[in-house]
Image (cartoon, rainbow, N blue to C red):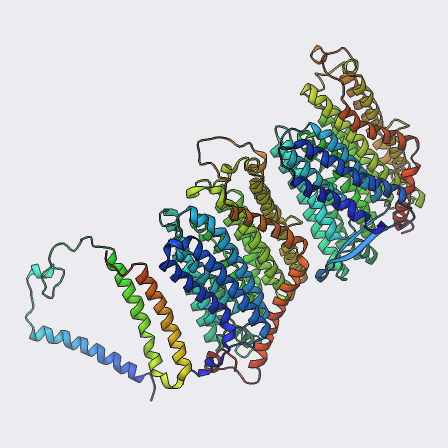
Amino acid sequence: MTAPSLQIITWNLWVSAPVCALAASAMVTLIAGAFWPAFARWLTPCLALGGIALTAAFTILAGMLGLPPAGMQVMDSFTVVFDLIILIAAFITVLVSNHYVTRENLERGEYYALMMLSASGAMLMAASDNYVMMFLGLELLSIPLYVLAGFSRGRSESQESALKYLLLGAFASAFFVFGAALVFSATGSTNIVVAGDATERALVGTTPIYVIGLAMILTALAFKVALVPFHMWTPDVYQGAPTSVTAFMAVVAKAAGFGALARVAAAGPEGSWTVLLWGLSAATMIWGNLLAISQNNIKRLLAYSSIAHAGYLLMGILAGGRAGISAVLFYLLAYAAMTFGAFAAVIILAGRGDGAEDIEDYRGIARRSPLLGWTMAIFMFSLAGLPPFAGFFGKLYLFSAAVEAGYPGLTVLAVLTSVMGVFYYLRVTVVMWMQEPEAESGPAAQTSAPLLSRLVLSALAVAVLALGIFSSPVLRWTNSGSAGLERSAEAAIQMTLPEPTNAPAALSGGSR
Amino acid sequence: MNPYLPILFMLVIATAFALAAMALALFVGRPRPGPERKFAPYECGIEPVGSARDRFPVKFYLVAMLFILFDIEVIFLYPWAVVFRQLGVFGLIEMAIFLGILLVGYIYVWRVGALEWQ
Amino acid sequence: MDRWVLTVITFLPLGLLAAVLFVPGRRPNVIRWLSIAGSLVPLALSAWLWLDYSGGAHGLQYAVNRPWIPLIGVNYHVGADGLSVPMIFLTTLLTTISLIYSLNIKERVKEFYCLFLLLETGMLGVFVALDYFLFYVFWEVSLVPMYFLIGIWGGPRREYAAIKFFLYTLVGSVAMLLAILAMYFATGARTFDIIAIAGAQPFAGQMALQGLVFWALFLGFAIKVPVWPFHTWLPDAHVEAPTAGSVILAGVLLKMGCYGFLRIVLPTLPEAAQQYAVWVAVLALISIVYGAFVAMAQMDFKKLIAYSSVNHMGYVMLGIAAACSLGPANLSDRATALNGAMLQMFSHGVITGALFLLVGVVYERAHTRDLREFGGLGAVMAKYSVLLWMSCFASLGLPGMSGFVAEFFVFRGAFPAYLLITCLSMIGLVVTAAYLLWTIQRVLLGPVNPKWAGLKDMDWREIVSVVPLIALMILFGVYPAPIFRILNGYATGLASYFVGG
């Protein structure tokens, strides 16, 4: 073997600037929290917000530069759109966390630093066009999440959640590495597009090794986004983790997985891939919605609902193309707004020590706090997919993309399962609005919250409504993202066309 | 020559060496140590002091983990040293960033008091 | 100004809602009177619309068409024609009346009025929308407030009734959504415009697919109407809903189902509509006869009126089925049937609204709706007695009242198309007369039950709510020309789809 060529160095540093900016901000936050623990309460969240805003500026700037692929990472419009979605989600997480972290005495600089590191991993995953880089992103996303899941050290549920997530997550990571290795051995490239293209152009043919490798990668990503049957960890981990971390996990980790899936899907793996996705999507929608119906704990209910939503999102990946990926991006944004909203309400309602997490604890809350009642109703109706909220528009774009791509059967299934979903979302509104509040001895749900929490809650409700009614500009924006994904895939193939791929050249990322 | 041949040689030599050592002990050494030695935790001679099932501070683990972390990271310096000339200034900056991140970690660990025994 | 009048009517309640939100909840009277006064503006505008509307065959007026989500071809397209103008007026009228009647709501006043105003926007939106997307959005928007109105201010089984109402309607509307997507992709023009898609006739000649889409849409609208056997949510929802909720539910929401048939199904899928019209007619017949007999068996006053809605909406469906029947019926027959159906929609809204209000009046005094316990109220409550007599007569189709005109037109139009079915549905007329007269006898006549001797007669709030409705019943019963002037253009235009085909 010759020494790997050193072309890696020629990459454009701008491409990784956003990820680096966020990671650097995370380190600053970490050190600041360690040096001035007395000010951690307000200093670290402020630093986190500042770092996220700075990263967003870098992302927009890097996007405007129109950078070529840099070997293992691409800064195309897909990356820009996706990174901004992640950053918006991270920004909201910081705002939503504040109340929770203060109440539960988790005020340590590490909290925000870990979250930012995890978000930078999510960004890296979606920006990578190489399995090796994607794995790096996957780990950078996951490892801080394992810590965060167990961040509430005093509660054994939190520790259980962390351990479960760590063990199963490590397992999934192993699947990813093994899958990437098999794909590499079958196609001679770790570049996602080049590997997919090599099989398509029958340079190596669709060997069983390639199919198995791809299936293993799919398994790992399916674990991250909680697709049935790789969802078993979700309810336990979501329930045990600190609520603000659960919200982050439900949105950012899921989004990262879908970003990676979009990259893999854009490489155009044919044949058995679509069959697999079809089956996974159908199973996830049915099973997630079915199990959600019988839940009594609000966090478990939201966990199962997040599984169901992963099923809908997968439809967009399956449909692919400009419309499908654009719908996925739009839905992720809508999903982020409504999921954060629901969790923000749960954070307030659960009260100190997360005592009141059963749906029954929320009897008559709407009467005690109209704000919580109205906003929670909006989030529930949006999650259920009712117009004029963002959830409906997102679902509609996904469904119409799926119909257009030739999956009417799956669409009918999705519509039917979303009716099933309405039932359990309605239950929450029934309890909150239509039942009488009772002065019982159990853990009473709280309705008092600091001004910031109430503002965030209202802003998210408005966002859910606005994303629905004024979805046109947002859709145009996400459309530009999916167009960028297509262009990058084409460009990567163009670059490999002149000469046949071979293993050493592909090691350098398939570009020169 | 087949590039894997040296590995075969190494396997053969390793096996032969192990077998030879055992055979040599059989012939040269004085076997049959007493039963009290057989059941001791360290057969090679040091007398154990007290029970091995003892509680000792969790801080040991912390120190051990920190040691491993920084120790492993230092290993990355070796491959860099090998290609130092080819990588040039870029490699130097790259390594400075890497060590900078390590330094941040070190400062953090030091600042939160993980290095203090009490 | 003309072009935007529909937008103003539709979104004014929403603006009012925003204003009400800023009134503190401890000043309920400000909230009440602000809402009522505000709701008079859309009412006045819709009355002006009625007078200003000029009719004509394809008399689409006040149309506004602006891009909303251009990427997938969604437009903000609103307009009014002969079908929608009376419905818009009915909606604003019944909303104002409901708001006045609901002055007696004491609990959670602010939420009640906010939800009601949201409901008004949703309903008006359905009647003005000319884009499938917009239509669907408003359709669902009208669903949510009604769900809360039933669930919060309803009777003892309100949670059950609210969820049942919501899920039933939702099942129908997702079927409709699938049908809309199918039409959208079949048209291939990347437009959700109702009129453009109807003009493109997306499934011309493809009977299998057209049939599928037809039945999906049928499910969506038939649940709302409701047509037997999809009616089971209706009695529960009506019995549990607060009085004002029942008025809107029966007066407007049910009409949205019929409106869907007339606006969407008939023009867009004429072949399938013609093909399956006889099945629709049979279901309508069952609704008429079954609804009447079940109503007769009720001991609960409100449930009786609820089942009478099933019965009366059956006439609308019969008229619609007759208008698109296969067979010899000529243009005039079909147009007559449609005119009757559309008048019945309006007339039933007015009559049932009044009846539900009157049930509410007596329930608030007696705290029971059991017909066996009443008796002799005519002697105790004179004004009430007069108004109930008149409403019941209008409902059973006494000549001189609007119900008679509507039903007569339906039967006249349906006769050439479905001789047997029309004759059989006459049974419904007889039974309706029987149960309504029997109800009057049980409530107003006979010896006074001493328990009710002290009941107060209707106060000004109740009289103001009911009297305008009675006036409309008589007006259109005696002189229906003003409403036929508006309806006839649309009816004739729609009927011409089915002549000679």
Q: Residue at image x 36%, y 50%? A: A153
Q: Is residue C475 left or right of residue A190?
A: right
Q: Residue at image x 41%, y 83%? A: B89
Instruction: Give x and y (percent) for residue C483.
Output: 89, 38
Q: Residue at image x 88%, y 29%? A: C474
Specify whether residue A1 is in view: no
Q: Is residue A392 left or right of residue A55?
A: right
Q: Image quarter for residue C465?
A: top right
User: Please, is residue A57 above or below residue C171 in the view?
Assistant: below
Instruction: Give x and y (percent) for residue A355.
Output: 43, 40
Q: Is residue A151 left or right of residue A392?
A: left
Specify whether residue A156 is in view: yes
Could you say which is closer to the camera, residue A133 or residue C91? C91
User: Please, is residue A262 above or below residue C79 in the view?
Assistant: below
Could you say which is closer to the camera, residue C133 or residue A336? A336
What is the tally of numbered marks visible in this picture? Answer: 0
User: Please, is residue A440 above or below residue B61 in the view?
Assistant: above
For the N terminus of chain A, which image quadrant?
A: bottom left
Instruction: Give x and y (percent) for residue C386.
Output: 83, 20
